[in-house]
Image (cartoon, grey):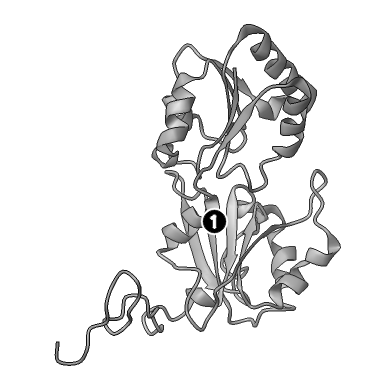
Amino acid sequence: MKVYFIGAGPGAPDLITVRGARLLAACRLILYAGSLVPEAVLEHAAPDAERYNTAELNLDEQVALYRRAQDEGLDVARVHSGDPAIYGATAEQMRALRELGIPYEVVPGVSSFTASAAALGAELTRPNVTQTIILTRMSGRASPVPERENFASLAAHGASLCVFLGGNQLAEIVGELRAGYPDDTPVALVQRASQPEERRHVATLGTVLDDIRPSEWALTTMLIVSPALAGVEEAEGSRLYAPEYAHRFRRAVKDGE
């Protein structure tokens, strides 16, 4: 048997990878993060597969299910939202699996930060604006953020900053980011990216709190702060596809050709 950590994507059932959907259909025991993974994603699972919402289980209870699956020879789909490598709380599960001698495999998924950028029709890396994306979150009781990664220090880079699951502390986050970014820096809130309930709010760092009720954005919200969101129509493009730009796969087109 084997445990598959499957990135279910940002929520739309057709944004799970082909590999993830195939494995989900084949596994007889399914553990999924019900607080973040919509039930619609589980339409890829076999109707008679056992399903457990891990939002209701502690780690010991989850490990007990892995142990039972080992005894019964059942493959397990451990379904996480987005990509398991980002805030997936997978390390402690993998450690337990290694102690039990249970093999596991990670199946990557579409992250909510890329789904949010897609919802905005935006590119987060633009030439001469920013070529760096920082992924972070607000410190919480379960997973504190190291002090050296505070928002003021991250904002000092002026890069594209994606803040996961910070909607319930939005006012505090914006206040801290204003210490590093100019007030006219574009920001976007994307809630439930790719899902039927998706909604977006675009503003600047100085005005983002003026036209919304922060309490309405408390759950499943991505905050993107980025100079790359501004002036897209007048932006300088990449040279990658310029006719006169040559590389190993394409020769340059000279004037007159």
In this image, 228 relative to 138: left or right? Answer: left
In this image, 37 relative to 59: left or right? Answer: left
Image quarter for residue 3? Answer: top right
Q: Name the one closer to the observer, 176 or 94.
A: 94
Badge 1: residue crowd in 10 Å (few <14, some 14–19, many ≥20)? many
Task: Find the residue positioned furthest to the front.
Answer: 248
Task: Find the residue positioned furthest to the top.
Answer: 72
- Number of on-image labels: 1
What residue appears at the point 74 percent right and 57 percent down from the top-left corner? 138
Rendered location of residue 240, percent (x, y): 37, 76
What residue appears at the point 59 percent right and 32 percent down from the top-left corner? 105
Q: Is residue 51 above or below residue 228?
A: above
Label 1 SS: helix
In this image, 44 relative to 85: left or right? Answer: left
Image quadrant holding the C terminus, namely bottom left
What residue appears at the point 49 percent right and 47 percent down from the top-left corner? 110
In this image, 163 relative to 192: left or right? Answer: right
Image quarter for residue 7? Answer: top right
Q: Is residue 232 above or below residue 146?
A: below
Q: Is residue 28 above or below residue 252?
A: above
Rendered location of residue 65, percent (x, y): 69, 16
Rendered location of residue 185, percent (x, y): 58, 78
Task: Find the residue positioned furthest to the left.
Answer: 257
What residue appears at the point 79 percent right and 25 percent down from the top-left corner? 99
Task: Find the residue positioned furthest to the right.
Answer: 147
Q: Is residue 143 visible?
A: yes
Provide the residue designation for mark 1. Answer: 113
Q: Is residue 58 visible?
A: no
Image quarter for residue 55? Answer: top right
Rendered location of residue 199, percent (x, y): 47, 54
**Residue type highlighted by circle 1:** Phe
Q: Is residue 34 above or below residue 184?
A: above
